[in-house]
Image (cartoon, grey):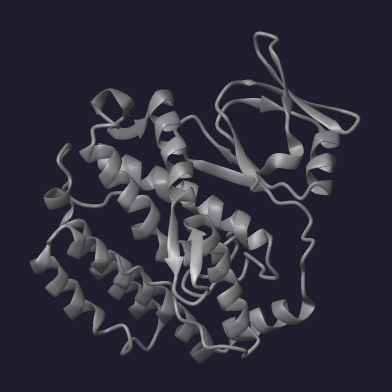
Amino acid sequence: MKQPLIIFKNGTIKREQNTLFFIEENGSKHVIPIEAISEIEIFGEINFNKRVLEFLTKKKIPVHFYNYYGYYTGTYYPREHLNSGYVILKQAEHYLDYDLRLFIAKMFVYGAYRNTRQNLINYKCDEIVEIIDFKSSNIDKAATIEELMAIEGNIKEAYYSGFNQILKQFSFEKREKRPPDSEINAMISFGNTLLYTKVLSEIYFTHLDPRIGYLHETNNRSFSLNLDIAEIFKPVIVDRLIFNLVNRKIIRKEHFEKEAGAYFLNEQGKRIFVQAFESRLKDTIKHRRLNRKVSLQRLIRLECYKLVKHLIQDEIYEPFVMRW
């Protein structure tokens, strides 16, 4: 199975014929095992030229970039190689027809709700489960995307209120994104960013166009479908990872920095989090329909395939719901 290449150090990527090398600032030279790489995640300051990008395009390897604070800054998305004109037309059709779009958007919100609910059940947050169950009853009633996103926001607000019951380290008042005003908010933002790019990479290997989303508006933003699909997997992958890292004290106070009121993971903290994130993606579950074990990363790809089937009217889309 191919693995992501994660680069934290500063340096240069060079191409010599059909081989890529990473050269650190101190001159150390490392061969990049290109055939074993699924994508490249760059957190350091890296220089490379057009010949490198041409080679990455040939090998169908996306490159995701993050700034010093761990915020996503952009993606080099190789030329699409699995484009299907028919699927793209169907994607656009389901966006332009408001009822069709609203149905898919509701499925994303429903999947996110069910998975957050399972997290709360696992940690015996029974009162909050009752609250989000009540709020979720409005999902089907939503007549617009705006109403639906408001319902989703209300469910998330209640869900996050249970974090102090779950976490054994750090206090957490409420979700703040810009800027993250606590250690937990910093981890949620960083984890969600990693998930967005992971979903984007999985979409690349399907017939879907990541620029056409349903819950998140398709506008001047480069990609939106990855944000939609990620909603389902945030509770499964990111939140459970945070609970584990915090409660086992793998991530601690010394792994954060604070600047102008904003918290962010320092280099060591990012390394620990990214390594744990990639390990979490390799965790397997027994897939009920396939009757075999699949990794959580594979589940993301399967979710994309399910959406394709819905778009071409082969099978009604139902989001992944965890039951453990």
- How many marks can you see? 0
Q: Quadrant of the C terminus?
A: bottom left
Q: Residue at x 48, y 46 (%)?
A: 194
Q: Where in the figure is residue 214, as x and y percent of width and height?
A: 51, 75
Q: Where in the figure is residue 313, as x and y percent of width and height?
A: 62, 90
Is residue 167 in view from this perspective? yes
Residue found at the very far top of the displayed protein: 26
Specify the quadrant of the image occupied by residue 128.
bottom left
Along the viewing direction, whichever of 188 and 166 lies nearer the viewer:
166
Please say if 310 is above or below 285. Answer: below
Q: Residue at x 17, y 37 (%)?
A: 170
Q: Residue at x 56, y 68 (%)?
A: 302
Q: Is 298 positioned to the left or the right of 14 in the image?
A: left
Residue found at the very far front of the displayed protein: 291
Q: Is 284 positioned to the left or the right of 168 in the image?
A: right
Residue found at the very far left of the displayed protein: 127
Please say if 271 is above or below 293. Answer: above
Q: Residue at x 46, y 48 (%)?
A: 193
Q: Is 21 positioned to the left or the right of 251 in the image?
A: right
Q: Where in the figure is residue 102, as x and y percent of width and height?
A: 46, 84
Along the viewing direction, whichever of 107 and 221 lies nearer the viewer:
107
Q: Where in the figure is residue 226, as x and y percent of width and height?
A: 54, 62
Along the viewing direction, whichever of 197 and 322 lies nearer the viewer:
322
Please say if 92 is above or below 128. Answer: below
Is residue 182 in view from this perspective? no
